[in-house]
Amino acid sequence: MPELPEMENYRRLLSELIINAPITNVVVNREKSINVPVESFKEELLGTRTIFVERRGKHLIFHLNNGRRLLLHLMLGGLMYYGTEEDRPKRSTQIEISFGDRTLYFIGLRLGHLHLHSAKEVDELFAPLGPEPLDRRMNPEKFAGILQGRRGSLKSLLVNQHVIAGIGNCYADEIAYEAGLLPSVKVQDLTEASVARLYAAMQKVLREALEGGGYMDTPFMVGDQLTGGYDDQCKVYDREGEACYRCGGTINKSELNGRKVFYCPSCQHEQ
């Protein structure tokens, strides 16, 4: 599932390509991917322009010049491609939004969605979300305050969007590894030093993943050399049975509260 680095990478790319470009065509191949009737969806979008692309957690919000918002959540397996019919991936699309001779293809939205909302509705939907981990207002003290009084496993806390927005399975494991902590460690048992180490790990992993283009392996457009560049830099995620880069131990895969977990039992500990 695309997480903060992947969605922020998309946001940056889209901000360079579609801002103020009029929408010239809309195709909806799967009605369940939208939240209004198809004709209403098309009528509201045709001729409008995107004036700003915002990311909140794992979502993208397209701010339209008519005051409406398009809210995107790719969920599991979703991706976007920008280009022509000839060069796009040979996969079925659920929604297509064209800007002249280029089209933004929404692929894999059978679990995700692209919903049309008012600004007020978007604010209400995001009200329960936790703070952004890379927000300039986030610091070690605020992070420690967020963890204070929390209980349960570290992995469960990191992926809880009501606690911190944007982290999912992949980066939760990578952050725990960077901090030298087991994903199963109880948050209430973490020492002050461990919490400080965890904060530093979160900042380091997410920023490196963002600058590396995230871990999604499908280019966003022809000539895109950045998207997916971080995939080969993951230290534990999806590396079951491989050697740990830090200590040479073997990366394990297990399940924790219904989620798969990758970790090194040799160099990740309780504190």
Image: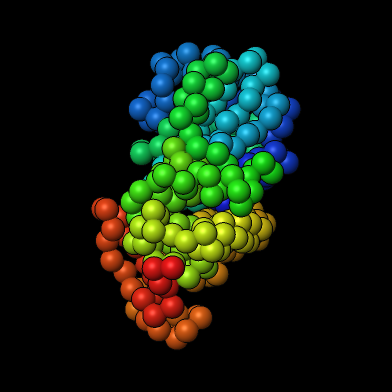
Res 172 visible: yes
Quadrant hosting residue 44: top right
| Left or right placement of residue 122 versus residue 226 in this view | left
| Left or right placement of residue 142 versus residue 248 in this view | right
Q: Quadrant of the C terminus?
A: bottom left
| Left or right placement of residue 90 versus residue 142 in this view | left
Give the answer, above or below, for where 145 lies relative to 94.
below
Q: Residue at x 28, y 66 (%)?
A: 254
In this view of the protein, which residue sits in the foreground, 104 or 124?
124
Q: Position of residue 13 (x, y in %)?
A: 67, 45
Give the answer, above or below, for where 126 lies relative to 138.
above
Give the answer, above or below, for where 153 lies relative to 232.
above
Q: Position of residue 65 (x, y in %)?
A: 68, 18
| Left or right placement of residue 62 versus residue 237 in this view | right
Q: Residue at x 36, y 62 (%)?
A: 185
Q: Residue at x 43, y 32 (%)?
A: 113
Q: Residue at x 35, y 27 (%)?
A: 32
